[in-house]
C-alpha cells in the first residue's frame, strides 16, 4: 500500500511543481520577473527613509535618525539621537539638520506634541502640544508652503478627528479643521501634500479606507470618497493634478480637484494589496511594493501593463520606495537583504525623463536660508 502511495505521489510531483510555478505566473499573466540588481547598498539601516536631495537620504527608526550621503561609491552615514524621553515618533525632514517630529513623551505622562527640532544644535525651534486626550495619526510637510500638517484622533472617540496646520518657520499660524468621517472609530492615517503644497490628500486605513483632498489655503475638504479595503499609500503625480491610492484592491488614480476616478488597475485573478508606492519622475510608471510576495511591481500607467516584477528575498518587506531623479534606478529598503537600503537598477525598458524642479511656492523657509549663510 505504501509503495502504491509513493508511486502515485511520484507521478504527481511534476504536476504539483508545475501548478506552483503556474500560480506565480498566473498573476496577472506573463510577467517578466527579475531579481534586484543593487547599484549601491547602505547596510544596517532602517527601511523607512526619504530624500533630501539627489545625493542624500534620511533614514529613521524608533530610536534614531541618520543622514546618508550617497554621492560616492561608498555611502557615508551620520547618526543623530532623538530628544530624551521620546518613546515613539513620526518625522518629516525639513533640511539636513532640521526635522519635524511628532512624538510621544514618556516623561510627560505620555503627552504628544509636534516639534521643529535641530539635530545639530540639539534644540527645539518650535513646539505645538496636542490637546489632552488626543493622539497623533499622520504627519506631512510642504517646503513650498512652509507648512506642517498633522491629524489627531481622540483616544475615547469623544471628539471627531482633527486636521491641524502650522507654519514651520516663523510665527505660529495654527489652524484646525474637524474631519467628518464615516464612523467615530476611523482615523486619517495618511497625509501627502501636492508638489506645490496647495492640496493635501488624506486617506483612512480603517473601515472603508476612504480618500479625500483638502484645499490648504481655504482649509476645507474639497471631496471625500469611500474606497474598498485598507490603504497602503498615497502618491501625487508630478504636476499635482492627480494622485494614486494604493492598497487593498490595487491602484486607483483620482482627479485631485474633484475626486473623479481617472483610471484604475484592472481586475486581476488575485488583486494585490500594495504596501508602498512611488511614481517615476515623469509619471509614466508606478512602483508598488507588495509584501505578501516580497516584490516590487512596476506598472505602466497609461495602459496598466505590468512591465516588470522585481522579486526580493523571501521574508523581506519593502515599506518605502524612491525613484532616482533620472528614473534609472530606485531606492528600496529590505529588498535585497534584511536591514539594508539599496539603490536598485530599473529594468531596461523602464526609463523615465529627469524630474522637473519643484515649484518655488510662496512660503520659503528661513531655516534653509539661514543654513546657507
Image: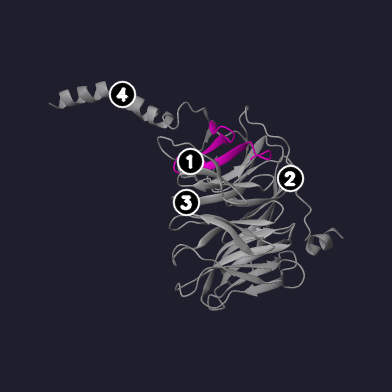
Residue 281 colored in magenta in the image: yes
In the displayed structure image, the side of residue 347 where residue 121 appears, left or right: right
Residues packed near mark 2 inside 10 Å, few (<14), some (14 to 19) or many (20 plus): few
Placement of the N terminus among the 4 image quadrants: top left
Give the mark nearer the N terminus: 2 vs 1: 2
Give the mark nearer the N terminus: 2 vs 4: 4
User: Which quadrant of the view contains residue 342?
Assistant: top right
Residue at mark 2 to residue at mark 1: CA–CA distance: 27 Å
Q: Would you place residue 113 above or below residue 265 in this image?
A: below
Q: Point out residue 261 in the picture as x, y percentages from the top left corner.
A: 54, 45
Q: Nearer the viewer, mark 3 or mark 2?
A: 3
Residue at mark 2 to residue at mark 4: CA–CA distance: 49 Å
In the displayed structure image, the side of residue 234 where residue 327 appears, left or right: right
Give the mark nearer the N terminus: 3 vs 4: 4
Numbered label attached to residue 54 = 2
Numbered label attached to residue 294 = 1
Residue 96 or residue 173, whichever sits in front: 173
Residue 19 or residue 234, whichever sits in front: 234
Residue at mark 3 to residue at mark 2: CA–CA distance: 34 Å
- The residue pinned by badge 3 equals 227
**Residue 275 shows up from this direction:** no
Q: Point out residue 190 in the picture as x, y percentages from the top left corner.
A: 55, 57
Residue at mark 3 to residue at mark 4: CA–CA distance: 39 Å
Residue at mark 3 to residue at mark 1: CA–CA distance: 24 Å
Numbered label attached to residue 15 = 4
Task: Tell me which segment is drawn in magenta.
Answer: 280-306
Q: Which residue is pictured at 73% across the width and 37% down the height? A: 354
Give the mark nearer the N terminus: 3 vs 2: 2
Amino acid at each position: 500500500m505504501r509503495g502504491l502511495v509513493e508511486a502515485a505521489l511520484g507521478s504527481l510531483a511534476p504536476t504539483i511543481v508545475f501548478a506552483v510555478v503556474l500560480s506565480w505566473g498566473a498573476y496577472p499573466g506573463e510577467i517578466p520577473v527579475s531579481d534586484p540588481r543593487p547599484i549601491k547598498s547602505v547596510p544596517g539601516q532602517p527601511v523607512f527613509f526619504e530624500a533630501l536631495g539627489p545625493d542624500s537620504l534620511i533614514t529613521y527608526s524608533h530610536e534614531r535618525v541618520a543622514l546618508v550621503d550617497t554621492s560616492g561609491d561608498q555611502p557615508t552615514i551620520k547618526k543623530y539621537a532623538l530628544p530624551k524621553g521620546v518613546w515613539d515618533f513620526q518625522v518629516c525632514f525639513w533640511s539636513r539638520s532640521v526635522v519635524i517630529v511628532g512624538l510621544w513623551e514618556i516623561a510627560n505622562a505620555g503627552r504628544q506634541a509636534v516639534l521643529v527640532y535641530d539635530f545639530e544644535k540639539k534644540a527645539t525651534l518650535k513646539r505645538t502640544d496636542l490637546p489632552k486626550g488626543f493622539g497623533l495619526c499622520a504627519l506631512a510637510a510642504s517646503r513650498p508652503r512652509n507648512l506642517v500638517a498633522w491629524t489627531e484622533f481622540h483616544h475615547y472617540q469623544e471628539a471627531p478627528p482633527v486636521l491641524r496646520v502650522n507654519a514651520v518657520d516663523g510665527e505660529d499660524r495654527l489652524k484646525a479643521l474637524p474631519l467628518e468621517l464615516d464612523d467615530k472609530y476611523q482615523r486619517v492615517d495618511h497625509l501627502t501634500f501636492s508638489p506645490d503644497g496647495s492640496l493635501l490628500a488624506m486617506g483612512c486605513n480603517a473601515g472603508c479606507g476612504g480618500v479625500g483632498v483638502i484645499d490648504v489655503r481655504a482649509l476645507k475638504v474639497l471631496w471625500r470618497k469611500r474606497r474598498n479595503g485598507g490603504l497602503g499609500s498615497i502618491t501625487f503625480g508630478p504636476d499635482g493634478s492627480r494622485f494614486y491610492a494604493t492598497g487593498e484592491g490595487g491602484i486607483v488614480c483620482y482627479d485631485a480637484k474633484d475626486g473623479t476616478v481617472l483610471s484604475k488597475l484592472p481586475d486581476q485573478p488575485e488583486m494585490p494589496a500594495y504596501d508602498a508606492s512611488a511614481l517615476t519622475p515623469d509619471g509614466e510608471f508606478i512602483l508598488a511594493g507588495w509584501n505578501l510576495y516580497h516584490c516590487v511591481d512596476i506598472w505602466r500607467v497609461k495602459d496598466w501593463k505590468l512591465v516588470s516584477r522585481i522579486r526580493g528575498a523571501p521574508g523581506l518587506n519593502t515599506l518605502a520606495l524612491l525613484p532616482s531623479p533620472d528614473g534609472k534606478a530606485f531606492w528600496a529598503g529590505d529588498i535585497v537583504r534584511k536591514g539594508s537600503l539599496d539603490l536598485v537598477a530599473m529594468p531596461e525598458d523602464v526609463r523615465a525623463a529627469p524630474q522637473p524642479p519643484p515649484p518655488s511656492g510662496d512660503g520659503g523657509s528661513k531655516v534653509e536660508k539661514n543654513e546657507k549663510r
